[in-house]
């Protein structure tokens, strides 16, 4: 099954501050975004689920700080362990978040929850199918023109196939010889002879290769997470897709 390549765009963003980033800085806490998506009510808002980790002795201070945030934003807050708290909140959709959603990209990390560097900037990495890379152009131009960030790299993540060349060759040879036909045109001995290996080796290559193909496809209900080689910088322009193969989310963020 062919996997479309994915591209990454990293922006060194400046001026990212809101109540969550200020709270993290105040209590020297760390956080990760568990979920971020459009809210149904109120409209043009995001629902964010944030897991915070901090010194357990600061729990009372963190709770009091959360209480000071507008009650319209904090939906729920619950401790899930010593020094760990999950916060559910709603946030108005920022222009940048809207542009990311409309481009079909996803954020690898939320810039609001990333530790600031010495210059006050934070890395903001976006991933998008390579065929959609051109859709990030308005966002990149916006960031550059407003002086609120600098694009530091644009690269492609090349999917790494889990099936080996030997397994691929064995499966292809078996298929061409009719090994998978019913009834079989040629048996395992013919496949092994064509590959110049023993029958045991040929059968092992076919079995392991088919196992990996089924596992990666998700048909067995245990699809593995995508693995990628080191991304390589590409300077050639990416042609826009010829057809609309995705549903725009702009209606979620614009007034009727």
Image (cartoon, grey):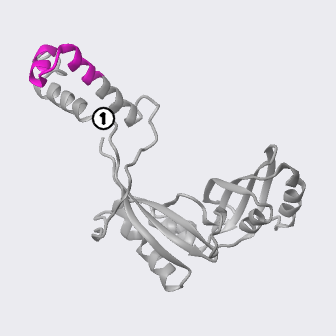
Which residue is rendered at x = 78% and y = 57% of the image?
Answer: 75
Q: Quadrant of residue 160?
A: top left
Q: Is residue 197 left or right of residue 161?
A: left
Q: Is residue 42 above or below residue 52?
A: below
Q: Main secondary structure of the magenta part?
A: helix
Stretch of the chain drawn in magenta:
187-207
Q: Quadrant of residue 201?
A: top left
Q: Is residue 72 left or right of residue 96?
A: right
Mark 1 — residue?
163
Label 1 residue SS: loop
Q: Is residue 188 above or below residue 43?
A: above
Which residue is rendered at x = 86% and y = 53% of the image?
Answer: 59
Residue 74 x, y percent position in the rendering: 78, 60
| Circle 1 residues within 10 Å: few <14, some 14–19, many ≥20 | some
Farthest residue, direction front: 118
Please indicate, yes or no, whether residue 107 appears anywhere in the rendered image.
yes
Magenta-drawn stretch contains 137: no
Which residue is at the front of the view, 194 or 71? Answer: 194
Residue 155 x, y percent position in the rendering: 38, 63
Residue 3 x, y percent position in the rendering: 33, 47
Q: Quadrant of residue 191?
A: top left
Quarter of the N terminus within the rendering? top left
Q: Is residue 84 left or right of residue 160?
A: right
Q: Is residue 256 left or right of residue 207?
A: right
Magenta-drawn stretch contains 204: yes
Which residue is at the front of the view, 61 or 250? Answer: 61
């Amino acid at each position: 099954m062919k996997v479309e390549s994915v591209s990454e765009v990293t922006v060194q963003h400046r001026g990212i501050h809101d109540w969550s980033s200020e709270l993290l800085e105040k209590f020297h806490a760390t956080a990760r975004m568990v979920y971020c998506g459009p809210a149904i009510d109120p409209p043009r808002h995001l629902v964010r689920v944030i897991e915070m980790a901090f010194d357990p002795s600061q729990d009372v201070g963190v709770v009091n700080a959360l209480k000071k945030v507008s009650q319209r934003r904090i939906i729920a807050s619950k401790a899930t362990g010593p020094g760990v708290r999950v916060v559910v909140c709603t946030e108005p959709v920022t222009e940048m978040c809207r542009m990311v959603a409309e481009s079909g990209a996803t954020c690898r990390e939320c810039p609001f929850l990333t530790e600031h560097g010495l210059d006050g900037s934070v890395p903001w990495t976006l991933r998008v199918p390579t065929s959609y890379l051109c859709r990030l152009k308005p966002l990149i131009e916006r960031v550059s023109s407003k002086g609120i960030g600098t694009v530091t790299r644009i690269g492609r993540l090349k999917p790494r196939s889990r099936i080996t060349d030997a397994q691929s060759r064995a499966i292809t040879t078996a298929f061409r010889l009719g090994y998978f036909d019913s009834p079989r045109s040629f048996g395992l001995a013919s496949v092994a002879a064509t590959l110049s290996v023993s029958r045991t080796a040929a059968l092992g290559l076919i079995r392991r290769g088919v196992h990996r193909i089924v596992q990666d496809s998700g048909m067995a209900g245990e699809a593995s997470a995508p693995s990628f080689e080191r991304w390589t910088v590409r300077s050639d322009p990416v042609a826009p897709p010829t057809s609309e193969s995705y549903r725009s989310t702009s209606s979620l963020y614009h007034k009727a």
